[in-house]
Image (cartoon, rainbow, N blue to C red):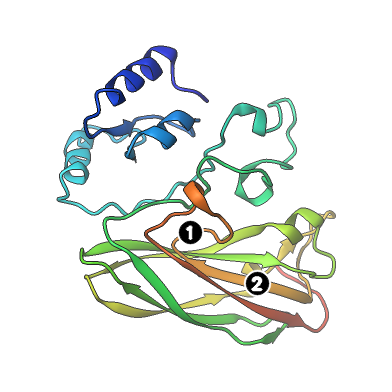
Amino acid sequence: LDLPRAQEDLLRKVAALGKPVVLVLMNGSALAVNWARDHVPAIVEAWYPGQAGGDAIADVLFGDYNPGGRLPVTFYRSASQVPPFTDYGMTGRTYRYFQGEPLYPFGYGLSYTTFTYRNLHSPGEIQAGDTLKLAVDVENSGKVDGEEVVELYLAAAGAAGAPPPQASLRSLRAFQRIALRAGEKRTLPFSLAPSELAFVRSDGRRMVQPGAYTISVGGKQPGFTGAQDASTTAVTTVAFRIAGAAREVE
């Protein structure tokens, strides 16, 4: 997962000049850029941007566009944090099952403005098989217009019958990308159907299980601190219960 040695050496020599540096990564998957995270002021993840990539990167670097992307994969600190490729199990892989400390978590992304979240409204309890309806206030609290990716995560906290990995970690169940002018606030609704509240049991059946859950809504995953925490956005969490008998869904 490391950069090639020649590129790492070049990066360190450029950074040693003491001038402002932005590292632009052009890659197809996660990289373990540990030294860059601690020593380079800014990193732009460009992936494989295509023939218009130069123009797009220039717009970001010169402030003509406010970036709003989110990482679609977990960036690990090293390959030693994940199981060998000969192990096809999901334990220890992806944001849903990885319990270590990542370099950057799934869903991470920064902005040239800031976003705040308030008033996450949710019913305290629903019946198994019902749709969960939520709403949250999102505000561009900075001075620059920008786009925000609002992520909704579901976590089981004592749901009967939920497998242990799914009971301790979270799962992205919905997201919306919105554009907000500086100072603008919007109330954003979410609706989770029974199929989006279900867990897959060990026997392969998709079941809505009664028990305690949490919903987290924001521009990032909850629970991270320091460099893993996207400082330009926020997240808010609410608890609710699913009551009644377990329901199988398609």
Query: Does residue 161 lie above or below 123 as drawn?
Result: above
- Of 228 and 193, the residue lying toward us: 228
Residue 153's label in the rendered image is none
Residue placed farthest to the top in the image?
6
- Element assignment for label 2: strand
- Amino acid type assigned to the residue bearing label 1 in the image: Lys
Label 1 packing within 10 angstroms: few (<14), some (14-19), many (20+)? many
Q: Position of residue 243 (x, y in %)?
A: 77, 83
For disc 2, the neighbor class at 10 Å (few under 14, some 14 to 19, many from 20) is: some
Q: Position of residue 150 (x, y in %)?
A: 43, 65
Quarter assignment of residue 59 = top left
Name the side, left or right, on which 200 lies relative to 179: right
Front one among 52 and 145: 145
Among the 4 quarters of the image, the one containing residue 86: top right
- Quadrant of the image occupied by residue 41: top left
Image mark for residue 214: 2
Quadrant location of the C terminus?
bottom right
Say if 83 sits above or below 66 in the image: above
- Asked if residue 92 is positioned above or below residue 96 in the image, the reply reads above
Q: Earlier in the sequence, mark 1 or mark 2?
A: 2
**Relative to 209, residue 56 above or below:** above
Left or right, 202 with reference to 126: right
Name the residue: 47% across, 47% down: 227
User: Which residue is identified by label 1?
Assistant: 220
